Image (spheres, rainbow, N blue to C red):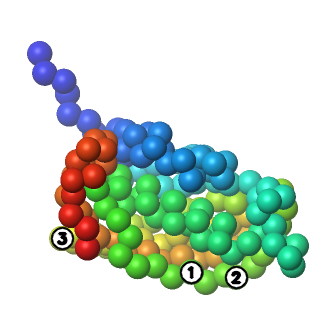
Amino acid sequence: MSESPLTPQQLAEACAESMFSRDHASQGLGMRITRMAPGYAELTMTVRQEMVQGHGNCHGGFLFTLADSAFAFACNSYDEATVAAGCSIDYLGPGQLGDVLTATAEERSRRGRTGIYDITLRNQHGDTVALFRGRSYKIRGSVRRLEDIAAGDNP
């Protein structure tokens, strides 16, 4: 008897689990995946002392990294290896020491080999900290099989 195919939701969750197991950067920053769906990801990260810059706020590079990780999980939720082709971020407010930041990534368009994703970063009070837009490019390979990714083409 053959194994039943995964539902789109199960596939998104399996892709996230597989990617996160290899994602030492996101793990090292204390990120957690709190919600996954096809074309959607939600990650959280607590602002730690070593993330605070000279003005007493979370360094923008850490905000960017949280948004970029959410983008990566959302655009790789179909088990088709996908990389960033470009992105931009607008910082709207500071992240503070101890803040629990949530990055919500939502697919806006996915056609052919490209996609557009919007990511909103909010603090635990619901205040928007940053807006990020990412452009994705699909390469060859399965997200769940690392050897396929290593052999894939790059833009």
Image position, residue 4 (x, y; %): 20, 27
Is 153 left or right of 53, judged from the image as shown? left
Q: Nearer the viewer, residue 140 or 135?
A: 140
The residue that label 3 is drawn on is 112
- Cα separation, mark 3 vs mark 1, equals 24 Å
- Residue at screen point 26% across, 73% down: 155
Query: What crowding class fits label 2: few (fewer than 14 Cα within 10 Å), some (14-19), or many (20 or more)?
Result: few
* Disc 1, SS: strand
Residue situated in front as seen by the camera: 100 or 37:
100
* Category of crowding for the residue at label 1, using alpha-carbon neighbours closer than 10 angstroms: few (below 14), some (14–19), many (at least 20): some
Q: Nearer the viewer, residue 89 or 42?
A: 89
Q: Residue under label 1, please give it.
A: 89
Specify the amino acid type for callout 1. Ile
Q: CA distance from mark 2 to mark 1?
A: 10 Å
Give the number of callouts.
3
Q: In this rendering, does residue 63 appear at all?
A: yes
Q: Are marks 3 and 2 in contact (CB under 8 Å)?
A: no
Nearer the N terminus, badge 3 or badge 1? 1
Q: Determine crowd level at label 3: few under 14, some 14-19, many 20+ residues with C-alpha closer than 10 A.
A: few
**Callout 3–callout 1 Cβ contact below 8 Å:** no
Q: Is residue 121 left or right of residue 16?
A: right
Give the quarter of the image for residue 126. Answer: bottom right
Mark 2 sits on what residue?
A: 92
